[in-house]
Amino acid sequence: MSASFDDLTPDRILTAVEAGMACELTGLTSPLPSYINRVYELQSTDGERLIAKFYRPGRWKRAALQDEHDFILDCAADEIPVVAPLKLAGGGTIGEYEGILYSVFPKKSGREMDLYSDDNWLRLGRLVGRIHLAGSRREAANRLQMHPETTTIPELELLLGGGFMSPHQRDRFKAVTDPIVEIALREFEGIDLQRIHGDCHRANILERPDEGLMVIDFDDMVMGPAVQDIWLLLPDHANQARNEINLILEGYEQFMEFDDRQLRLVEILRAMRIIYFLSWCSTQVNDFKFRSHFPDWGSDMFWQREIADLEHQYHAILNDERLKADGNFC
C-alpha cells in the first residue's frame, strides 16, 4: 500500500475533492466505516453533503472502476434507485490525486427494509430484475468473471500453496474443496454470465421513506450468474427458503427472464463465497488493521472452524433437492 494512501489527511482530502468538483468545501471530513477504501463525508459551502471514496491502490485498475460506474449510470438511466457517482470537473467520474483514484457521490441514507411480507419479497425481485435488465445490455470487460475456473480455483491455489495451514488441516481442506469444485465446474456449464451487483445482500438495499428501495455499494460487481444476486437475499438455505425464492422470481420475471437451471448453483455459490473470503483474508495478513479485526486468522482453531463450515456446506450441496431431482446424485 502506498504511503500516500496511509497518510491521507483532512487537508489532502479537501484539496483533492475541491479540485475535482471545482467547488468549495467546509472543513467537515468525517470518516465512514470502510476497511478496503478510505471513505469520508464532506460538505460543500452551499450545504450539500457528499461522500468521497478514495480507492485502495492495487485493488482495482481505473478501467475496472469505470466498469462499475458505467453499470451504476446505466441503472440510473433506467430510473433504478442507485447512488450514482457525480461528474468531476474533467467530465468523468473518477479523479486522481497523488496517484490515488477517487470518486464523489451524493449522500443518501435509508433504513434496512422490512421483509415480513410477501409483497416485500416481490419488490426485491422486481428491483433485482430491473438491475439485471440494465446489466444485460453490455459487458464489463475489466471485471472478474464469477466462475469456478476464474475465481475459485485460483483462490484455492493461493490458500493451499501459501503455507497458511498445517499439513493436516491442508489435507482436510483439500478433501472438501476438491469435490465442491468438481460439482461447481459441471453445474456452471452452459450458464450465462452478465453484469450483476455481486454483493446483493439485504444491508445493501435500503428503504427510503416516500421513495422506495435503493441499491448501494456496487464495489464487488462482476460478470456472474443472475442467481448470485438472489441467493444472498435469502433467509436460509435454498431448500428452506422456497417461498421466498418463488416470490423473488415472480417479481424478477416481470422484467427479466430467469434461467431456472441457475437455482442449482445457490449452495455452490455459498461455498464459493466462503472460499473467496478466505482467499481475500490471506492477502491481508500483513496488514495491521486486518490483524486487529481478525486476531485468530490462520490459527489451528480458525481452520478447524472454517473447514467444518465448508464440510457442512458440501453436505448442503449434496442434499440440494434440485440436484438430486436431476439425477446428479444418488
Image: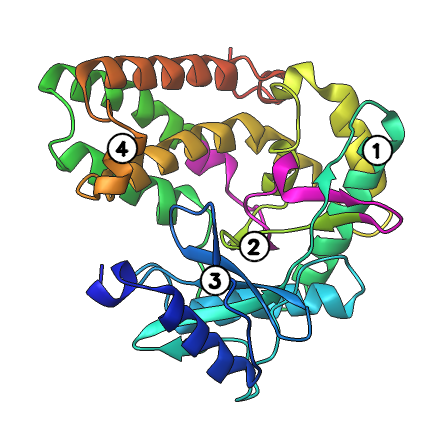
Q: Amino acid at mark 4?
A: Ser
Residue density around tag 3, few if under 14, some if 14–19, many if 20 or more, within 10 Å:
many
- Could you say which is closer to the camera, residue 220 or residue 151? 220
Q: Which residue is mark 1?
A: 120
Q: Amino acid at mark 2?
A: Phe
Q: Which residue is mark 3?
A: 53
Which label was assigned to residue 292?
Answer: 4
Q: CA distance from mark 2 to mark 1?
A: 22 Å
Which label was assigned to residue 218?
Answer: 2
Residue at (77% x, 59% y) in the render: 80
In terms of secondary structure, where does tag 4 sit? helix
Q: CA distance from mark 3 to mark 1?
A: 31 Å
Q: Which of marks 4 and 1 precedes in the sequence?
A: 1
- Could you say which is closer to the camera, residue 292 or residue 194? 292
Judge depth for marks 3 and 1 and give the one in front. 3
Please name the colour scheme applied to the rendered image. Answer: rainbow
Q: Which of marks 1 and 2 precedes in the sequence?
A: 1
Q: Which of marks 3 and 2 precedes in the sequence?
A: 3
- Could you say which is closer to the camera, residue 259 or residue 131? 131
Q: Which of marks 3 and 4 precedes in the sequence?
A: 3
Magenta segment boundaries in residue numbering: 184-212
In terms of secondary structure, where does tag 2 sit? loop
Q: Are marks 1 and 4 in contact (CB under 8 Å)?
A: no
Measured from the top left, where is residue 267 in percent x and y? Answer: 53, 25
